[in-house]
Amino acid sequence: MLISASYICPKRGLAGLEPPEPVTLGRAAKVAKAIGLERLLIPVLEEALSGMIRAKIAFLDGLVEALDQIDEAGTTAWFIAPAQRVLGLDWVAPQMVGGFRDPSAEPVFVDGKVRHLPRLDLWADPSLIQKRIKTFRELLSAVCGHPGLTGWLILDRALEWVRPDAWEADWVLKSFLGEIRDQDERATIYMGIGWQELLEPEMVRALSKQVDGLRLSGLEAWSPNFRKPPHGMDDLMAAAYLGTLCQWLLDRPTEVEVGWALADRTGDPEEMLAAGERLGKQALGGVNWVSLADPAPGLRQEPPWVMAPGLERVGLVDQGLEPKAWVEPWIKQVRAAASEAKVVHFIDVDPQEYMDDPQMHLSRLWNHFLEFE
């Protein structure tokens, strides 16, 4: 099981549309390797690649410098590109939203601030799709072939933006995959989905056959249909369950995003270890912690950290890049459990039975999963 973390620069953040500060990233990459992480996931915002040519070139140069730092630290990176939902907030380019404020619209970060703007159906606009593919191609041309870059997480949570038709999603996915394969045949490619796709799995079941694996996220929002687990680490237990279900149903290695529970409370070390052991035993493709580092104090009132209480403390390391006391034992526990992984057999239906009524089975099998503790 591969254990990784997403990297949001604790010095620059995301709101300035800048690449990670290289010295800080170099230190963070060394710390990440020392505590047992095998990879960093770096979100690349589409808006940062959609501006004036000079700003775009500077941003791309900064990404190359970031990869240099990661490679020098002896670890590797994947890019999340285009990154959409980062720490619970959608980050979009101006062409993806309407120009008039809509108080009922979900918040998005665009044009320098969080705004409530209507979402446009990007799937139905061929000219917009071609523009996005061109922007993605420019990113690939700048970074492909760098030894520090070994994979891509593409179209992360894109199916949730405006729900596409299956043929629209298939065409866009094929386009992104083709661009990567043209420039790097060896790269590993995952697609990012929210766990809610398991309630309507037909589309993602067809799409997932084209990628090497899936990254399952979305545990910032807990389903009201799930009863709470008997101890505090809700998202670790839910990730173990949902990741196993996703891997079984879609027949693809599945990495799960975890760490949201720390926004609500300080993790109890014993509960963390117990939940980490259960997570490791599920034989998942990987575990990705939602954020490596806590932000500097000056960033805590900026997006995304200002959007919800506690987001500034979900990192594995503090603002000084020192690992938190529970982190290394937890990583060792997950890895030790994964080395002897025996999936808990709580699933008592076949895939077609699940597909016939996913809403009922998702909730029912969660109860089974908890009973197998």
Image (spheres, grey):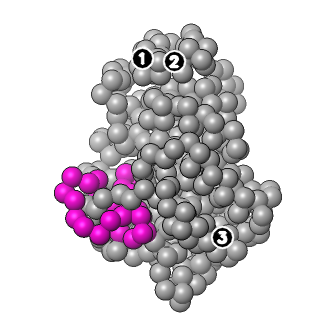
Q: Residue at x 35, y 23 (%)?
A: 226
84, 282: nearer the viewer: 84
Q: Position of residue 257 (x, y in %)?
A: 50, 43
Q: Which contiguous range is marked in magenta?
A: 86-110
x, y percentage for residue 161?
A: 42, 51
The vertical placement of 371 against 47, above or below, is: above
For image coordinates 52% across by 51% down, the residue present is: 156
The residue shown at (55%, 26%) is 245
Instruction: State the separation of the CA atoms marked 1 and 3.
Output: 42 Å
Q: Quadrant of the N terminus?
A: top right
Q: Which residue bears the numbered disc 2?
A: 356
For the question of whether residue 370 can be seen, the reply is no
Estimate the spatial distance between the alpha carbons at disc 2 and disc 3, rounded to whole Å. Answer: 39 Å
Of residue 273 and residue 15, the one placed in the foreground of this image is: 15
Check disc 3 and report its element: helix, strand or loop: helix
Q: Is residue 358 magenta?
A: no
Residue with the most extreme bottom position? 54
The answer to whether residue 181 is above or below residue 272 is below
Residue at the left extreme, as displayed: 103
The residue at which mark 1 appears reads as 360
Of the residues shown, which amino acid type is indicated by label 3?
Arg
Dot 3 crowding, Cα within 10 Å, few <14, some 14–19, many 20+: some
Location of residue 23 (image quadrant): bottom right
Q: Earlier in the sequence, mark 2 or mark 3?
A: 3
Q: Secondary structure at mark 2?
A: helix
In the rendered image of this protein, does residue 170 appear above or below residue 302? above
Q: How far across and down, in percent of the image, does residue 269 sit?
A: 42, 35
**Mark 2 and mark 1 residues within 8 Å of each other at the beta carbon:** no
Check if mark 1's residue and mark 3's residue have beta carbons within 8 Å. Answer: no
Q: Residue beneath label 3, please?
A: 137
Q: Answer whether residue 339 is visible to the viewer in this image.
A: yes
On residue 244, the disc is none
